[in-house]
Image (spheres, rainbow, N blue to C red):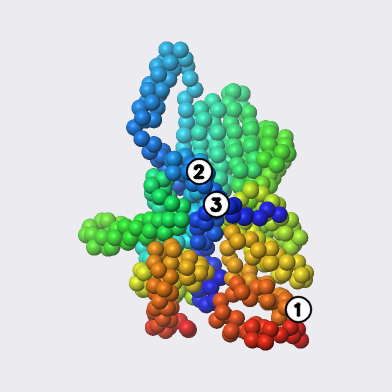
């Protein structure tokens, strides 16, 4: 984190949140073009398509009509009949694929309500990172937010399979929540729990699960730095200092100065210069010189503050 | 607890998240392997979006710019020769895309007739209400800084990178990056005073 408070405020304001990244991901997915791999694959692909088309015309007279649509409208609910008997009211981000008989909606963020005509032989599925929702004929809603995916049923019956392995069979007026399992999802949940005032224990449990999951170093950095911040706000200074040390021991972790600042402050408070020493090297020398930590540099003193 | 540790055969790729990429994965990227390129894009999403927000300037939609950066990445990343060149290449692509957006924004200002002005999302009433006055003032000051100075200030003083990291991304010698950072800080301070923000 920058040392200038003006730049700190600006850095925080311009930081990319998980919701921003989800939105950007959806926009890229909607616009991307296939990677150019030369002329040969194109010719082969074209020939294969032509052959497949011929086979379809000759051998399969009635194939289901494919459908495709992209929803990219957080904050604006729009109702669309995506296939005969399937009404989708979307307020968020998602991609529709599959066929008219078996639509598949991959939902990324926000709320979507579906009304499926019963008895029409439709196999409608909604997938999120945390859940697979299957339905035959009913009215239900799927809401995907930082805390996870919540499924509610208005009429009929819905089968929900969460990615953590749990299954739920929901009838009218019942709902189920599938928790995130990916590191990114768990980071979003931890941040949402913190913003919602949840207990440190709940937040730390979520962070621990996130740190155990496969992730990029950017997500690891965010989770680990959040763990240090949450612990620092509590009473267990030793645990916070240990978490800061673990963070900095990982060469791939970012936010080093910010974490070192917390570690140095808590280390100094609890054990004086010897407590702050492991973190001082990660701080800008001018910052150390301008703070109480400067005495640790000059005298190497181990005086514990009163 | 999982620790991300660079492997012996891996190379540091990214100044912000200090991510690493195995030689095997880099070969897959160079072959144009779609999942490998997708994974690489995923690693760079936050960094590029933040660069776009911090370097964009007025009347530019940073989300739109970030989206265009990744469309370039998806098409061209396999042309990058060495993984060590990736951070500077990624930054150069971002700056080029932002320069195009700036040119378009400039042209729009002078086009006669009914060409609609693109709203600056950072200046919408809702966005203004959400951000405090200080953040707005800092953004205005950054918009007044020359492009080169702004870039080094963003990398070092906002994103907390070291001088060597910034030099690598900007494709400069470390000494040049350091002196540019000194000038950027001085200019930022001067503009803060001029704009009535306490230094």
Q: Earlier in the sequence, mark 2 or mark 3?
A: 3
Q: Chain of mark 1?
A: A
Q: Quadrant of residue A46?
A: top left
Residue A234, position as x, y percentages in the image: 75, 69
Q: Secondary structure at mark 1?
A: helix
Which residue does the numbered mark 1 point to in the structure image? A271
As measured in the structure, the alpha-carbon distance from the residue carrying label 1 to the one carrying label 3 is 38 Å
Residue lying farthest top? A58
Tell me the distance, in whole angstroms, between the alpha carbons under discs 1 and 2: 47 Å
**Is A141 located above or below residue A50 in the figure?**
below
Q: Say above or below: A17 vs B173.
A: above
Chain letter, disc 3 residue: B
Residue under the point 51% across and 27% down: A100
Q: Are marks 1 and 2 in contact (CB under 8 Å)?
A: no
Marks 3 and 2: in contact by CB < 8 Å?
no
Viewer-nearest residue: B98 or A20: B98
Give the SS element for disc 2: helix
Give the residue at mark 2: B36
In depth, the one of B51 and A160 nearer the eye is B51
């Amino acid at each position: 984190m920058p040392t200038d408070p003006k730049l700190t405020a600006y850095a925080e304001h311009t930081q990319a949140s998980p919701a921003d990244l989800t939105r950007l991901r959806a926009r890229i997915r909607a616009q991307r073009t296939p990677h150019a791999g030369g002329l040969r694959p194109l010719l082969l692909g074209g020939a294969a398509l032509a052959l497949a088309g011929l086979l379809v015309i000759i051998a399969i007279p009635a194939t289901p009509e494919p459908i495709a649509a992209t929803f990219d409208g957080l904050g604006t609910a729009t109702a669309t009949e995506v296939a005969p008997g399937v009404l989708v009211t979307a307020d968020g981000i998602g991609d529709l694929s599959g066929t008219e008989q078996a639509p598949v909606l991959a939902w990324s963020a926000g709320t979507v309500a579906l009304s499926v005509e019963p008895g029409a032989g439709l196999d409608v599925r909604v997938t999120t990172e945390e859940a697979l929702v299957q339905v035959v004929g009913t009215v239900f809603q799927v809401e995907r937010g930082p805390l996870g995916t919540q499924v509610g049923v208005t009429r009929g019956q819905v089968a929900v399979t969460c990615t953590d392995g749990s299954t739920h069979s929901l009838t009218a007026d019942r709902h189920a929540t599938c928790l995130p399992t990916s590191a990114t999802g768990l980071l979003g949940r931890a941040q949402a729990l913190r913003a919602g005032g949840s207990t440190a224990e709940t937040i730390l449990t979520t962070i621990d699960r996130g740190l155990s999951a496969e992730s990029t170093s950017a997500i690891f950095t965010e989770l680990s730095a959040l763990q240090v911040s949450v612990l620092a706000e509590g009473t267990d200074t030793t645990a916070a200092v240990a978490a800061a040390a673990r963070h900095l021991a990982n060469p791939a972790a970012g936010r080093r100065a910010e974490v070192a600042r917390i570690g140095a402050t808590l280390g100094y408070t609890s054990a004086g210069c010897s407590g702050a020493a492991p973190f001082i090297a990660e701080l800008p020398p001018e910052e150390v010189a301008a703070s109480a930590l400067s005495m640790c540099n000059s005298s190497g003193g181990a005086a514990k503050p009163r | 607890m999982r620790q991300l540790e660079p492997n012996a055969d891996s190379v540091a790729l990214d100044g912000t998240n200090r991510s690493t990429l195995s030689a095997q994965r880099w070969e897959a990227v160079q072959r144009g392997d779609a999942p490998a390129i997708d994974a690489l894009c995923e690693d760079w999403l936050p960094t590029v979006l933040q660069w776009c927000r911090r370097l964009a300037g007025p009347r530019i939609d940073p989300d739109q710019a970030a989206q265009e950066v990744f469309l370039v990445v998806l098409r061209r990343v396999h042309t990058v020769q060495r993984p060590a060149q990736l951070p500077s290449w990624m930054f150069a692509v971002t700056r080029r895309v932002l320069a195009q957006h700036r040119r378009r924004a400039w042209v729009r200002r002078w086009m006669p007739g009914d060409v609609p002005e693109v709203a600056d999302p950072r200046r919408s009433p809702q966005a203004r209400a959400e951000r405090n006055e200080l953040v707005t003032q800092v953004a205005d000051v950054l918009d007044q800084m020359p492009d080169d100075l702004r870039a080094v200030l963003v990398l070092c003083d906002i994103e907390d990178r070291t001088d060597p990291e910034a030099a690598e991304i900007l494709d400069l010698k470390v000494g040049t990056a350091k002196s540019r950072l000194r000038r950027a800080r001085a200019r930022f301070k001067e503009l803060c005073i001029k704009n009535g923000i306490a230094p």
